[in-house]
Amino acid sequence: MTSRPVDQVLAAVDSGLDQSLERLFALLRIPSVSTDSAYAAHCVAAAEWLAADLAAMGFTAEARATGGHPAVVAKSPGNGGPHALFYGHYDVQPVDPLDLWETPPFEPRIATAPDGSKRIVARGASDDKGQVMTFVEACRAWKAVTGTLPLGITMLIEGEEESGSKHLFDFVRANKADLAADIALVCDTGMWDREIPAITTSLRGIVVDEFKVVAANRDLHSGVYGGAAANPIHMLAKAIASIHGADGRIAIPGFYDGVEDLPPDVLADWKGLNLRAEEFLGAVGLKHPIGEKDRLLIEMVTSRPTCDINGIWGGYTGEGSKTVIPSEAWAKVTFRLVGKQDPVKVREAFRAHIRAQLPADCRAEFFGSRGSAAIALPWDMPVLAKARAALTDEWGRKAVTIGTGGSIPIVGAFKEDLGLDTLLVGFGLEDDRVHSPNEKYDLTSFHKGIRSWVRIIDALAG
Ligand code: BES
Ligand code: ZN
């Protein structure tokens, strides 16, 4: 009996895993940090590496200018069937604090976990180079075994996701015809746990802002002026402390406009998933959720909006002490949005709130970039059932549909500009340390991730 093509492709994935890993390692060695301009040339190098690799597989591929870091666009035409637009990102988050990495972040290695399982350790191993390469390797295996892909595929792999996809929105709008497809596929999310695969159907939106509080026109001697002159660090701290109330809610007027409660059946489903603080927070050395008092933990991290200060600085932070009242204090802040919250309105409400907290002698200046609204995908997308069956075949456990608290800004534009729903399937795990030192991707995530895409491609074509 001859085996089905998909089985031959799966066998090729298994026998070619070492080479797949070598290619991933080559990409992981390129320090493509998007937010820091010192790494711009490395972002170009990562884009060119991907374009060359995809061209070698027979895609028409190039690294295209966006006004920021280049985006890779690669195409393999279909044979009249459905066409998929695959999206991922080759950029990574900054690596600091560097001294907390056990080995250098851009020298990928395979480590053995205490339970004997293997993991790939490097910045970007999980978010998102490892995940992007699960899809690329699945396509490679299809091409190697059958000479073609059963599905028309366009890949869009960008280099600014981790800094808000600043230039990609215009790029998508300007290249609608080139990016036309029937469905978008994204590999940048996680599994429910190490055994249960997941399809993500909601993403939180995001507002990113940065501000400084300015007081005196220069730094002052705290002995001469202390007691009289406004200290901008104190004022910034007070303003930040006023964002959350004692009940865990955000006290900015109008902030909750557009936030909706979950439908009762979804809430009941999520209760059943039983996300427990002892495990979820216990794994990072915490115990007590600090969100809204009347909410489930899973709501706090998925369907409720948040505000986090991501960085704060000002004054003297060098060795020893300096008796100074600084003239400025700074903070970086992000809001996660849900439902119909409007990013522009949230940003303006936040700025008005901060200004209202400051005394007459202090002023605030803001330096934000564009935000993106939350995404909720239709639970009845026809591709959902196909992807669920393919994932269930691979993992031997029924794939669940979940929401994630993270953000992938461009997904909204796929709907608005290209008219596409998005299938979000990823193999990240909670302990992957994404955005943290010692980021990792389980070898199983990589291997079974490739196999999962082989099956999903087959299912979507069929
Ligand atoms: N891969 C993440 C999004 C994500 C995080 C999905 C956790 C599922 C679980 C993505 O690369 C990311 O980190 N996005 C940024 C976007 C921001 C910088 C605009 C985020 O969510 O912080
Ligand atoms: Zn990512």
Image: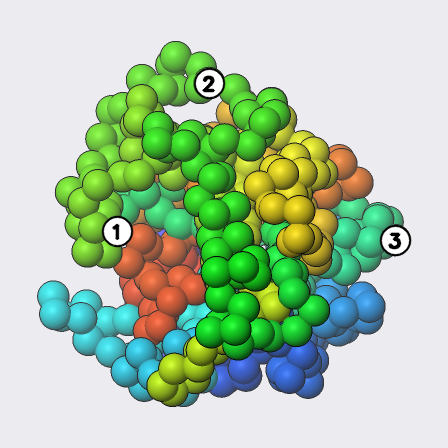
34 and 54: which one is in front? 34
Q: Is residue 176 left or right of residue 123?
A: right
Please identify the residue farthest to the top as the structure is shown. 264
Please report the residue visible at 52 percent of the width from the left and 46 percent of the height from the top: 239
- Residue position for label 3: 174
SS class of the residue under badge 2? Answer: loop
What residue is shown at x 55% (from left), y 32% (from top)? 252
Residue marked by disc 2: 261
Mark 1 is on which residue type?
Arg
Quadrant including the C terminus:
top right
Q: Residue at x 49, y 85 (%)?
A: 29
Q: Earlier in the sequence, mark 1 or mark 2?
A: 1
The residue located at (80%, 66%) in the rendering is: 66
Mark seen at residue 448: none
- Look at mark 1 in the image and give the residue it sits on: 194
Where is residue 168? Give x, y as percent. Answer: 75, 57
Residue in front for this viewpoint, 306 or 65: 306
Q: Secondary structure at mark 3?
A: helix
Camera-nearest label, 1 or 2? 2
**Disc 1, ligand 1: is the CB inside 8 Å?**
no
Q: Give above or below for 137 relative to 260.
A: below
Q: Amino acid at mark 2?
A: Asp
Quarter of the figure with residue 39? bottom right
Point out the tag, 3 or 1, that comes first from the N-terminus: 3
Q: Position of residue 381 (x, y in %)?
A: 57, 28
